[in-house]
Every structure is written in C-alpha cells, then in structure tokens.
Image (cartoon, rainbow, N blue to C red):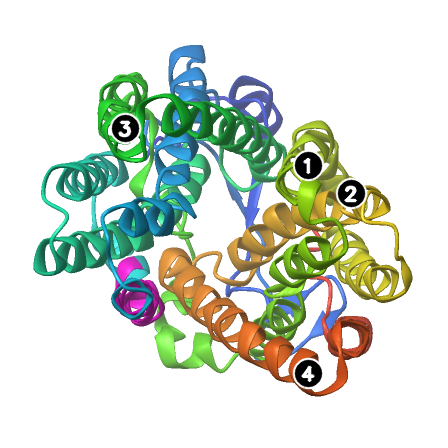
Amino acid sequence: MARLQGSWSADDVERFAGRRVSVPATAPGLAETAEGRVGEPPEQHVPFIAGESEPLHPSRDSLRGLDWFIFFLADVQTGFGPFISVYLTSQKWTQVDIGLVLSVAGLVSLVAQVPGGALVDAARSERLVAGFALGGVAAAALAYATWPIFPVVLSAAVLHALASCVLGPCIIAMSLGLVGHAALGERLGRNARFAAIGNGLAAAAMGASGYLFGPRSVFLVTAALFVPTMLALSRIKPKEVDPEWAHGGPPEVDIKARQAGLPTLLRSRPLLILALCALLFHLANGSMLPLVGSVVTMRASASATIIIAACIVVPQLVVALLSPRVGLKTEVLGRRPMLLLAFFALPIRGLLFATVSNPYALVAVQLLDGITAAAMGITVPLMIADLTRGTGHFNLVQGVVATAVGIGASISPTLAGYLTDHYGSSAAFFGLALIASLAFAAVWSLMPETKPASH
C-alpha cells in the first residue's frame, strides 16, 4: 500500500491518483448511510490514497476483456435455457424425466448461491475461479451433446448449476476489483449492455442452428464458445483486479469494519429489507412471461412463437439501450430512486397484461420489463456493494440475496398456475400485480438509500 511521503499534500496525491475514496468505519447499515445512523460506532472517513494494489485506472485491454467475456458468457448461458427441454424431448425423454433434471438443477442452484459467493470471497483470483467455472459449463454442454442418458445429463445439469452460482459473483467481483466503488455503477451498466446484446444474438443464432442442424448442435455451439470466452477472460490482467476491492473490502480500512463480523452483517436491517423486497419482486415477476406465453398460445396460436420471441428480444434491446444511463444515474441520484423505478414498473406491467387483449400489444407492454431489468440488474448489486463495503463479504451477501430471488422465482410459477386454473389468467395477472404493489410499498416505506453520504 502506497503511503503519503515527502512533501506531497493530500491534494497533490488526489490529483495524481485521480480520485479520493473515503472509507467508512463500518458498512452502511452497520454505521451510517445517507439517510441516518443505524449503529453506535461513529463514522470515520479516512482518506484512502491508491497504491499499486488499487487499480484506479485499469487498462483498456482489461476493460474490453471484461466486456467481451460478459458478451460470450451470455452466449454460452443462452444454450442452457429452453433449448434443454427441446433437445431432451427430441431424444425421446419423458416430460417427467426432463422435469426431474430441471428441478434438481434448480434446487442445486438455490442451495449453492451462498457457498458460491463465499468461494469467490475466499479466492485470491476471481479470474482463475471464473476460468474453472467456465470449463465446467463447457464440459456440461459437451455431456448434453454427446451422451444424453439420464445419469450423464443429471450430472451435467448439476455441474452447470454449480458453475453458474460462481460465474455471476465473479463478474461483479472482477468489475469491482477493476474500477472500485466510485465507478461501479457505470461499469455495471456496461456489463448489462453487453450481456443483453449477447443474450439476444445468441438466442437468434442458436435457434437458427437448432432449426438447420438439429437440437444437438445448440450444445456443440455452446461448448465451442468456450474458446472465445476464455480468450476474452485472458485479456483481463490479473494484477489489475484487486482481490480486496473485489470482496468489498478496500486494502486499508478501519478495523471495526472487519470486527463487525458476518453475523452482524447478515442482521443488517437494510440488507434484510433488500432481500425481502427481492423475494417479493421475483414472486410477482417470475411467472409473468410464461403466463403471457400461455395466453398468447390460446389467443393467437399461429403466431405465438413469433410473439413470444419478440417478448424476449424487446426487453433485451431496452436493457442494452438504457443500462449505461441507469448506471450513471445511480451515482447522481442515488440507488433508491432507480430501485423504486424498477419496482414501480412491475405492477403496471402486471395490470396491463391483465387488461390488454390484443396479443401483439403484449409486446409493447414488455418494454416495461426492459426498464425493470436494467434498473434491477444494476441497482441491486450496487446496494449490496454499499452494504458490504469494508467487510470482505461482498460476494457471499450477493449469494444471500440471490437465494431470496431464487425462492421467489421458484414459488411464482406454482402460484400463477393455481390462480390461472381456478380463476383465469386475468385474475392471475391481477394477483401478481398485487404482490408487485406490496413489493413497491416495501421499498418505498422501508428501504433506505445505501449510497454513502460522502460518496
């Protein structure tokens, strides 16, 4: 860690480093956020001057490498979406066996979120962890393509679920390790743009590959994408990803932040509120698009495939367009206004789905999904970074919130199916909109601003 030496003043070093970072004594929620003091320890702002271990100005190669890593990884993950069901059905699998594989993978993903985040926190090289996880994803794709029997496919599904629980935290951790807290909002906006473009292009390309060469080709293409994804990852320079920053704790921080400990952090009121709101959000959101698919199929079966494809692509375009601006706005306006925007758009979307009868108009309603995805995808990781700053548990807490998300998303289809079977699709959408309204009310009344007052 570089120190002030000689006759340099703090202002001299600030101009040299490019920015000054004030490190709070404890994480927001344990001490003080922009909206007030929660704990007893007084906040101490220590001017933190960058040394060799803090990459204030990462190289263009590292930033572009992260861009393209996210782009190609989105391509790879797209291959494990609905194509699994299509492929296994073509291999004469029963729907019971397909459902069992998907259910086991979903359960593993839910249980492994917190351990996956803890693993990333414990690692000294997120880049290395990401490389091993990516290798696991490629191996799973090859297993699907070459040996589609139940034990192999089940093992591949579990391997993919475990790897995905690590890759998500690795991306955000590398972003934080490269640019620090001050530029994280803008960086997450850029991440979301490249992921959205990758998802959209990959869905089209893999759909065409499956149509022309058969469903098996989707997984062969997915495995082949391992090569460009690893090449992109190799462009990120290891020395520029500071492991302490990547874990949420700067290299030099008041010891009280570390002494607070993980149990105290997990009892932080803002963190618990954020997790609860995320659960409610995905309880409402998780089944909206599948329910739209069922409604469209009943109302316009001839064009259902095209309409559903448009419902998937349109939000991705909105995310690609809006994410960088949302990232900047989180630094100017704070995190809470952007989170409120995401939660406000969801009940409006549910109400429109319940009342709009024209199948093609449903595509326009999906514009709101793009706004929601852009705001949520950037704001939630930023809030977690704020709440865990100086603790070294950034990625583990990501796993905690992701677990809450998974619980809400897993219950949502069952709830929507029950409401649809007993009361009709409109009633189901109204019910989901009601849950979304409760989530918005919770954010409005309970969730504080997490952006540090001195940020």
* N-term mark: 2 or 3: 3
Q: Is residue 332 magenta?
A: no
**Do the CB atoms of the residues marked 1 and 3 lie less than 8 Å apart?**
no
Residue named by callout 1: 310
Residue named by callout 4: 419
Image side of residue 44 versus residue 134, left or right: right
Q: Quadrant of the N terminus?
A: top left
Which of the pair 88/104 is nearer the observer? 88
Mark 4 vs mark 2, CA separation in Å = 23 Å
Q: Amino acid at mark 1?
A: Ala
Q: Secondary structure at mark 3?
A: helix
Residue named by callout 2: 363
Which mark, by number, is residue 217? 3
Mark 4 vs mark 1, CA separation in Å = 26 Å
Numbered range of the magenta stretch: 99-116
Q: Position of residue 60 (x, y in %)?
A: 45, 12
Does 365 sit above or below residue 218?
below
Which of the pair 315/38 is nearer the observer? 315
Which of the pair 120/37 is nearer the observer? 120
* N-term mark: 4 or 3: 3
Image side of residue 219 versus residue 263, left or right: left
